[in-house]
Amino acid sequence: MSSRSVVAGIALAIASVAPLSGVAHAQDLDCRNFRFQEDAQAEFNRDTSDPNRLDEDQGPDDHIACEALPSRASTDTVQPVSPSATATPPAAPVVPAPVVPSRGTRAGIGGTSGPSGLSLGIGLTLATGAAAAGGYLTARRLRRGSKQA
């Protein structure tokens, strides 16, 4: 086996894996990616198998995504217009208190806990292939060395 074929094999292995880099994490979303609960709910409704774990709160799954996030309805409060003839100063706008996550990754906040199964499979396949190629080349060199001696 010539060094050209080894280099070509390595280049082929890299070229075959390069398009897959980032595939496992391209769609990784969690509650931090959303400002409002309705946006997270819309993403959850696109795939109710919940691959992004947006419905990770304590208790049974209730199919409500990112319950700790504020709702659009609570931030769009409109003050009613007073029909009285006397002018009253406008009330201060109601600003909701910031929501502080309290359950970490169990609440769907915090991202993934490790590499995906696809990433592990690709990594193990490449490592096994590299070990097999290294063993083959070592055995071949040892055979050539014993024939020349």
Image: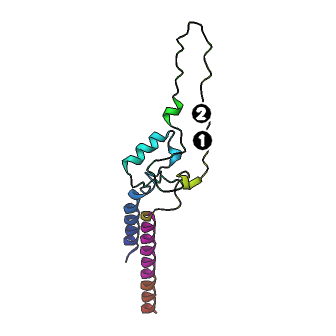
| Residue 105 place in picture, x, y as percent | 56, 55
Question: At numbered mark 2, what does the secondary structure look like: helix, strand or loop?
Answer: loop
Question: Which residue has dot 2 on it?
Answer: 96
Question: At numbered mark 1, what does the secondary structure look like: helix, strand or loop?
Answer: loop
Q: Nearer the viewer, residue 46 or 22?
A: 46
- Crowd band around label 1 with a 10 angstrom C-alpha radius: few (<14), some (14–19), many (20+): few
Q: Amino acid at mark 2?
A: Pro
| Residue 149 place in picture, x, y as percent | 46, 93
> What is the magenta range?
119-137
Q: Image height check: is 17 above or below 90?
A: below
| Residue 19 place in picture, x, y as percent | 38, 56
- Crowd band around label 2 with a 10 angstrom C-alpha radius: few (<14), some (14–19), many (20+): few
Q: Nearer the viewer, residue 98 or 88?
A: 88
Question: Which residue has dot 1 on it?
Answer: 99
Is 113 part of what is drawn in magenta? no
| Residue 23 place in picture, x, y as percent | 41, 56
